[in-house]
Image (cartoon, grey):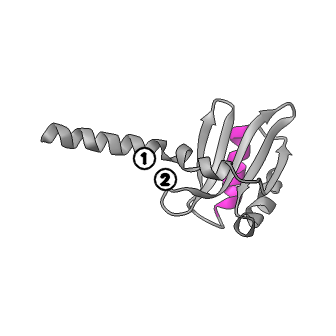
Amino acid sequence: MRKMTGFTAAMAVALALTGCVSTDDALLKTVPVGSGTSHLKPYDFVACAKAKWAPMDARVRIYALSSDTQAVSIPSGGMTSQSVVLAIAQQSANGTGYTIYGDVAVASRYVATTHQCD
């Protein structure tokens, strides 16, 4: 019984750690609400976006989708819930290209502040 409890706890932690990427899949299938380019590298861009978004919602999270793709998002509930706003940043020839996804009514204020990182 004790081994099963440890295994169950380990699985719960593993699922929680992978939750950030999997919960944003549905949002990535929607029409983007904004996009742009930044002179910053992807990691620096998402750090800038996080700093701009944090005063509007303290639950901002940053994570890597791949070695050259970073994401910054606002979860709808807990830190592993689906995002309501998501910015994907990828390396481009002149810095970073980014795309913002989310509900237009909610995401519009995040789009405006994200452009401050251009």
Q: Quadrant of residue 9?
A: top left
Between the C-alphas of marks 2 and 1, the distance is: 6 Å
Q: Which residue is mark 1?
A: 16
Front residue of 43 and 31:
31
Residue 118 appears anywhere in the view? no
Q: Residue at x 33, y 40 (%)?
A: 11
| Sequence-first disc among 2 and 1 | 1
Percent position of residue 16, x then y: 42, 47
Percent position of residue 69, x then y: 68, 36
Q: Residue at x 77, y 48 (%)?
A: 99
Say what amino acid the circle numbered 2 marks: Thr
Q: Residue at x 48, y 60 (%)?
A: 78
Is most of the magenta stretch helix, strand or loop?
A: helix
Percent position of residue 31, x then y: 76, 54
Say what amino acid the circle numbered 1 marks: Ala
Magenta span of residues: 42-54
Residue 3 appears anywhere in the view? yes
Q: Which mark is residue 46?
A: none
Q: Which residue is mark 2?
A: 80
Q: Are marks 2 and 1 in contact (CB under 8 Å)?
A: yes
Answer left or right for 73 relative to 49. left
Q: Residues within 10 Å of mark 1 (few under 14, many from 20)?
A: few
- Magenta-colored stretch includes residue 44: yes
- Magenta-colored stretch includes residue 51: yes
Label 1 element class: helix
Label 2 element class: loop
Percent position of residue 82, x then y: 55, 56
Q: Quadrant of residue 38?
A: top right
Which residue is outermost to the right?
Answer: 94
Q: Residue at x 70, y 50 (%)?
A: 87
